[in-house]
Image (tube, rainbow, N blue to C red):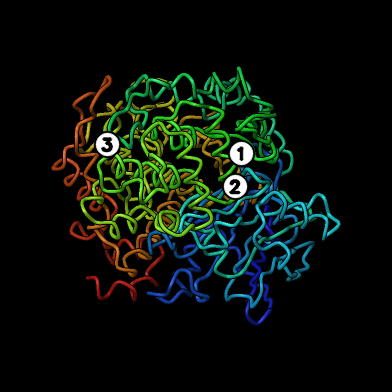
Amino acid sequence: MSYGYNGKILRVDLMTKKLKVEEPGEVFYRTYLGGGGLASYYLLRELRPGIDPLGPENMLIFASNVISGVPIAGMTRYTVAAKSPLTGGYGEAEAGGFWGPELKFSGFDALIITGKTAKPSYLYIHDGQVELRSAEKLWGLETGPAQEIIREDLKEPRARVALIGPAGERLVRYACVVNELKHVNGRTGMGAVMGSKNLKAIAVRGTNKLEVKNLEKFHELSKSLAELIGQHGPNKVLRKLGTPNLVMALNTQGILPTKNFHTGVFAGAEKISGEKMAETILKTEEGCYACAVRCKRAVEIPSGPYATSCEYGGPEYETLSALGSLLCIDDLAAISKGNELCNRYGLDTISTGVAIGFLMECFENGILSKADTEGLEFKFGNTEAMLKAIEWIASRKKGLGDLLADGVKAAAAKIGRGAEKFALHIKGQELPMHDPRGKTGQGLSFAVSPTGADHIEAPHDSPFAMAGPMLERVAPLGLLEPVPTLEFGPRKVRNYVYLQFVWSLYNSLGVCNFVAGPVWALPLNRLVEVVNAITGWETSLWELLKAGERTVTMARVFNLREGLGRKDDMLPDRLFEPLESGPLQGKAIDRKEFEEALTMYYEAMGWDPKEGVPTRGKLAELNLFWLEEYLKEKR
């Protein structure tokens, strides 16, 4: 008997309407855990290299894991994965909320979708039953109305719905998947893949309860974690201000992305801060299934030009920067409206903001003119232009909307005339709102992330720059000495390698980064106890970290076979240029140091130092030698 998971994976072929349930054994689950690990396995095993990401042959995987769904804080996240239409490589995005646990209550740990329906459809999964229903009346609707109609159609108000908006239907390459209108699988364009399959939504409802091996120990751990969260200083701040608490912190450090990464200081930072949000438009604090942190913000603006509904949550830090400081916009109400529009249409706010920043810089440098922008002045600070651009992108409006909907890499290539230097992306995915010129490990993280630039590939540098509680939390990894944020050498590479394994493990186990160490309340060794109590496995931190490393390596192999390599593990030129103002004025990533760190990272991973190809010995050590057939031509 399995504990903590169902042992069942559902397959749905949308073209033939055939269903199949697979029941992998314990060895499979213990090797891959779920989430990114499970998704990587199936994409590598079954997806033919070179396929069109928006073609029917792409697979779309929704994967929970072996522990989510039991009532314990911060272990509710699930993964959506496919070949990315934005990067052409490995695509993966996580989200919290309630959808992942509900999938497990319905009887399945993961869902693998292939093919394409002839007409718009949605899936309904409930207590082991599966229905494919018509979504023709839903197609074209925003996420809110579509979710409401689905629940009415099913006569099930408690159904959890993951769905796409008009942006996904129109194949915007950074469209996202949204559940509960506010929890978002945001990056790598998973909403576009869903739209390419004519799949509007997946509704799930379940009444099954998951068995726990050691119930007494589990209850003890669940209670202990709730108490830890209540006492933990950083988690208290997160409860009070949510991720918007980062606005002022990063601005003070001089690394708040401003004016398309020209500088790290924004004069209007206080106006868009978490503190200002709490004082003015915050309606309520919300959370995910069984979570004691409640870091989600729900804002409300009852009337006026930026009237905003709390149904769609509120802007996280990334959005406040992407639609705010990055564009030199300091109007919190307008940014909140932009966030609502993105959640209504199903757009990744990070890529959307960077696309608009790219457009503004092209406009200010004379590459684009009013003739291209319908008379609008797309200058930094123009709130009207920001909101209009969101509408254009989501609808793929002919001209700039259609151009930006393919991402800044493709847009710059089409525009030419020097526009490339304003397109801030890695592997085709737009930069998140963190500046590596003030935390060098983040530069390495952005560059080698298999999904393109990603801010949650590993913990950021700051917590480990000085002795203290956060550094103590990584002591089980053997990371014992502070490493300054601006240092870029062997110690920084070592830190990043180990911590990348941890973050990869969290993505496979569905663990929220805002609950677990090194920054937050749950210590690493306690996580081992949680897995043991739920599953009954006599596991260890060593085994779990190897699962994290295994997932990183599988994603690397996926990218290699799709033609990505060292040339793609590169930062945009702007990050090698000095910051123009603020406490770190004049600071830049040193190109030579970066190249040396990249080589050292490959070597530390057991990969070929020239192109980052995993060695045969490393594949064998990770029980991944079955991947050797994909790498023969790379050696």
Quarter of the rendering containing residue 631: bottom left
Residue designated by label 3: 492
Residue 228 seen in the figure: no
| Amino acid on which disc 3 is placed | Lys
**Label ID, residue 461:** none
Residue found at x 43% / y 52%: 546
Distance of label 1 from label 3 (alpha carbons): 28 Å
| Amino acid on which disc 1 is placed | Gly
Residue designated by label 1: 74
Residue 107, image x and y in percent?
A: 73, 61
Looking at the picture, does residue 561 appear above or below residue 225? below
Provide the secondary structure element on which disc 3 rests. helix
Seen from the viewer's position, the closer of residues 221 and 322 is: 322
Q: Quadrant of the N terminus?
A: bottom right
Residue 219, image x and y in percent?
A: 72, 36
Seen from the viewer's position, the closer of residues 553 and 580 is: 580
**Pointer 1 local density, CA inside 10 Å: few below 14, some 14–19, many at least 20:** many
Seen from the viewer's position, the closer of residues 161 and 497 is: 161
Residue 555, image x and y in percent?
A: 40, 60
Quarter of the rendering containing residue 441: top left
Q: Please identify the residue farthest to the left as the structure is shown.
A: 592
Provide the secondary structure element on which disc 1 rests. loop
Q: Is residue 360 left or right of residue 613?
A: right
Residue designated by label 2: 77
